[in-house]
Amino acid sequence: MSLRLILPLGLSVLVLTACGQKNAGSQAPGGSAPITESEAPPPTPAQAKAMVAALPAPWNAGDPELGKATFARCRACHTTTQGGPDTVGPNLWGLFGRDAGAKPGYAYSDALKNAGYKWDAEHLDKWLTDPRSYRPGTKMMFVGLRDAKDRADVIAYLKTATEVPPK
């Protein structure tokens, strides 16, 4: 085999190996402290059901497991774990009840910094439908989720993935 074939093949193996690894030992953006796993335990099925039931209708009918699958396309830009890093988009831990555009350490667009609301199921639904129409000037490039059921599922997932479960 020639060196021109071996080098790209070796780099591909390294990249694919790194993609399958968890964040443990990785560096946060800017080379600061290592990224750690979530400190909050995931909710039990009963806790997740109670968390979703606490959402107002129609979002209380969302399925967090289906939402997790739909949210997979969001993971390129967002993390959800407690203490997780901001990436292209902000970490979403503690999302519900947080002022839009106000998570410390993340450089939001003026469109979100000046939104004037707290994140709740209703605002998330509007945002997830079409972020650029809902908040013109946002830097988020996601085109949105047109299906109301998909949005309800993602909101249910976010409720269970970004908060400490009730005792």
Image (cartoon, rainbow, N blue to C red):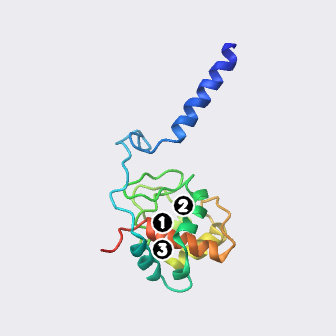
Q: Amino acid at mark 3?
A: Trp
Quadrant in which residue 130 is drawn: bottom right
Q: CA distance from mark 3 to mark 1?
A: 10 Å
Q: Position of residue 4 (x, y in %)?
A: 69, 17
Q: Residue at x 52, y 70 (%)?
A: 64
Q: Determine contact: label 3, label 1, CB under 8 Å.
A: no
Q: Is residue 72 visible?
A: yes
Q: Which residue is mark 1?
A: 101
Crowd class of label 2 (few under 14; some 14 to 19; many from 20; radius 10 Å) = some
Q: Which residue is mark 3?
A: 119
Q: Position of residue 136 (x, y in %)?
A: 63, 68
Q: Which residue is mark 2?
A: 109
* Direction from residue 54 to residue 59 in the image, left or right: right
Q: Position of residue 6 (x, y in %)?
A: 65, 19
Residue farthest toward the top in the current orientation of the protein = 2
- Numbered disc 1: secondary structure: loop
Q: Amino acid at mark 2?
A: Ser
Q: Amino acid at mark 1?
A: Gly
Crowd class of label 3 (few under 14; some 14 to 19; many from 20; radius 10 Å) = some
Q: Position of residue 9 (x, y in %)?
A: 64, 25
Image quadrant containing the C terminus:
bottom left
Q: Total marks drawn?
A: 3
Image quadrant containing the N terminus:
top right
Q: CA distance from mark 1 to mark 2?
A: 8 Å
Which label's residue is closer to the chain start, 3 or 1? 1
Residue 61 or residue 146, whichever sits in front? 61
Residue 69 or residue 106, whichever sits in front? 69
Q: Residue at x 56, y 84 (%)?
A: 58
Q: Determine contact: label 1, label 2, CB under 8 Å.
A: yes
